[in-house]
Image (tube, rainbow, N blue to C red):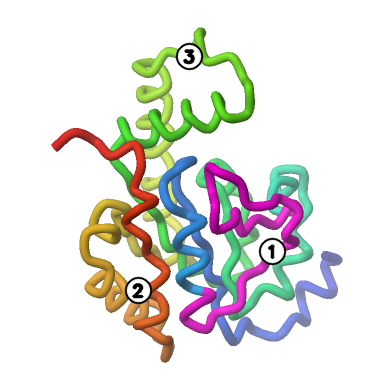
Amino acid sequence: MSFLKKLFQPQTKKPIIIVSGLPRSGTSMMMKMLEAGGIPPLTDALREADSDNPKGYYEFERVKQMDKGDTDWLEDTQGKAVKVISALLRHLPDEYEYRIIFMRRNMPEILASQRKMLVNRGENTDELDDAKMADLFEKHLQSTLKWIDRQPNVSCLYIHYSDMLADPMPQVEKITAFLDQKMDKIAMANVVDPNLYRNRAEQ
């Protein structure tokens, strides 16, 4: 975006809704819930549903280029929802307002789900060290949460995956209040499928 275009750009009327979290933390489920509730998702449908995400990934490929400066597409994202992995949140341009729904999930479940996905893709998992991966994820998570807290143009709601699967409606109420929008709460709750709660942590 040119300097003059930024200078005379009208103020954002609607915040951009970001769904984020660590890999395999329920971000695709959250995107589908928002869509069911009435918020249009930004997706190019290039990544098709599979056994790991049978209801779709809800991804937009250009998000992956934000660290290379590709952010112009955000102009058309106001009032929509887009999935942004936590590692790329720092590359969101500061001229917009963001409301981030950040998915949390028990670390053992994330690691188990990640490993299963790699196996399904035929990748070698013998050299994966769960302890090292957990440590890296935790350090990244803490750094990211601190960054979010420092951003004046960012509001964030944390939703835990297991809470959503156990009883979706209280979480749906939190989401609609956070987004300050009239949404189809029943349709959102109906998206949640406990049968997809695989790799559940031992209680």
Mark 1 or mark 2: name the one nearer the start of the chain.
1
Mark 2 or mark 3: name the one nearer the start of the chain.
3
Q: x%, y% of residue 115?
A: 47, 26
Secondary element at tag 1: loop
Crowding at mark 2 (Cα within 10 Å: few <14, some 14-19, many 20+) = many
Foreground mark, 1 or 2, reads 2
Q: x%, y% of residue 44?
A: 75, 61
Q: Which residue is mark 1?
A: 43
Nearer to me, 92 or 162: 162
Nearer to me, 193 or 173: 193
Q: Which residue is mark 2?
A: 189
Determine whether, in the image, residue 146 is placed left or right of residue 164.
right
Residue at image point 32% right, 56% down: 194
Crowding at mark 3 (Cα within 10 Å: few <14, some 14-19, many 20+) = few
Which disc is residue 86 wearing?
none
Q: Are marks 3 and 1 in contact (CB under 8 Å)?
A: no
Residue at image point 43% right, 87% down: 183
Secondary element at tag 2: helix
> Quick one: quadrant of the N terminus?
bottom right
Foreground mark, 2 or 3, reads 2
Task: Please report the bounds of the magenta region as a residue range.
Answer: 35-62
Furthest residue in direction bottom, as rendered: 182
Furthest residue in direction top, as rendered: 127
Q: Amino acid at mark 2?
A: Ala
Q: Is residue 48 magenta?
A: yes
Crowding at mark 1 (Cα within 10 Å: few <14, some 14-19, many 20+) = some
Which disc is residue 128 wearing?
3
Spatial CA distance of label 2 from label 3 is 35 Å
State how many labels appear: 3
Mark 3 or mark 1: name the one nearer the start of the chain.
1
